[in-house]
Amino acid sequence: MAASSGVVAHAEELVASLPAPPERTSGQRAEMDAAKDAARALRVAFLDTYADAVYDLLTAGRTVPLRIGELLDAAATELPGLVPDEDRLAAERRRPQAAKEGHEIDQGIFLRAVLRSPAAGPHLLDAMLRPTPRALALLPEFTRTGVVEMESVRLERTDDGVARLTMCRGDRLNAEDTRQVDDMETAVDLALLDPAVRVGLLRGGEMSHPRYRGRRVFSAGINLKSLSSGDIPLVGFLLRRELGYLHKIVRGVAADHPGQWHSPRLEKPWVAAVDGFAIGGGAQLLLVCDHVLAASDAYLSLPAAKEGIVPGVANFRLSRYAGPRVSRQIILGGRRIRAAEPDARLLVDEVVEPEEMDAAVERSLARLDGAAVLANRRMLNLAEEPPDAFRAYVAEFALQQALRIYGQDVIDKVGRFGADRPDAPGNGAAAARG
């Protein structure tokens, strides 16, 4: 597979010769689409045959653990034309979503093939469960002081062995972007690595956003302004989030010390407390926690299908909580689940009055601080979310989400959340979707 392949070279020549996507005529768009489809069919056929050989080449026979970004960088260097190189991606990052060529779709093709492989896929997932270099650098400070302040997350270890992770993007209702994904993975790593932590708590902080000033909010989901401006990357946000901190909450962080011989990963139980709302990615986060509380005036929703994208791994996890019919109502129909209605008990363990949330949170943390909790939690997760089933899902998600973020319907919908919106200091996912 090389850039000199006639099919691939033709697609690249067209990209260079045609105007930017928004300025193309219908004929030019059709010509470009046909050329890209031919090149992508070639990549799929190549990877269907050689995915394991390519992965072994890039990881020295699966002896080097590479995160997805590192793996794609290596593929771009060793096998030109298979995935976009850094120069091409850097040029894409400077453009709004509507003006991009969709080179990330080629990354999705590559990652789907790797993750589908019974040999390469588990190795890549294990690499993504390793602690990040940033977390390892901060770990001595956190174990000493018990506090780490980041731009979008505050992590504090209290005397009761609880790591209290507070999402504090107060101006944008904790709407997630790449900064918050990085901070969240760092915080989760630190909580899991610190031997003094026994339980983790996820909660939103008080907001400075004018519509919710002074109130706690859990999460408004993906930052739609960032999506519109082209700042929500497939690898650095959409896949890193699912294979990074969310998967680490489920499986734990990889540990490389002899005392951990009985398990390759360090795990902790997690409590989530929902004030205000948990929209999109916020609701997805609840599906990986062991105990979920919600204030009686809160609500949950997964509006990704309405926005045109896939709500992460929620399509895989939600049915085991809510059942197939309610799951389709939430994901396909955009149904909001209010904490006060009966169906909320499918997704939330406790519903309490807002003024009782603090006390209820402390009680739930104490219940999960038990010697047998970790072993039982591990066995429940193994039964409910078998690793191979998870791997098969995220393999297909890698490609389907890549296709969706470049769908014209998505570009049209998120375009209205641009910087010219009056409620857009980061948008708060459009002030919590209206």
Image: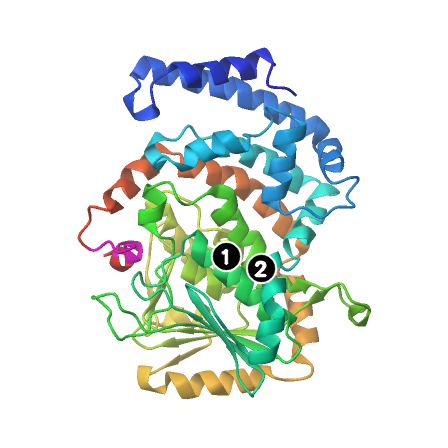
Q: Answer whether residue 59 is magenta in the image.
A: no
From this view, report whether residue 305 is shown above or below residue 248: above
Residue 429 magenta-highlighted: yes
Q: Is residue 374 left or right of residue 411?
A: right
The residue segment tinted magenta is 423-430
Helix, strand or loop: magenta stretch: loop
245, above or below 103, in the image: below
Q: Where on the picture, by quarter, is residue 112?
A: top right
Position of 195 relative to 126 (above/below): below
Circle 1 is placed at which residue position?
A: 182
Residue with the mark numbered 2: 134
Q: x and y percent of residue 187 in the render?
A: 53, 66
Label 2 vs label 1: CA separation?
A: 9 Å
- Residue type pointed to by label 2: Arg
Which residue appears at 27% of the width and 69% of the height?
A: 208
Q: Residue at x 42, y 45 (%)?
A: 232
Dots 2, 1 in contact, CB < 8 A: yes
In what element is the residue under mark 1? helix
Residue at disc 2, secondary structure: helix
Image spot of residue 46 (x, y percent): 66, 24
Q: Residue furthest left?
A: 422
Q: Amino acid at mark 1?
A: Asp
Whichever of callouts 2 and 1 sits on the residue coming sooner in the sequence is 2
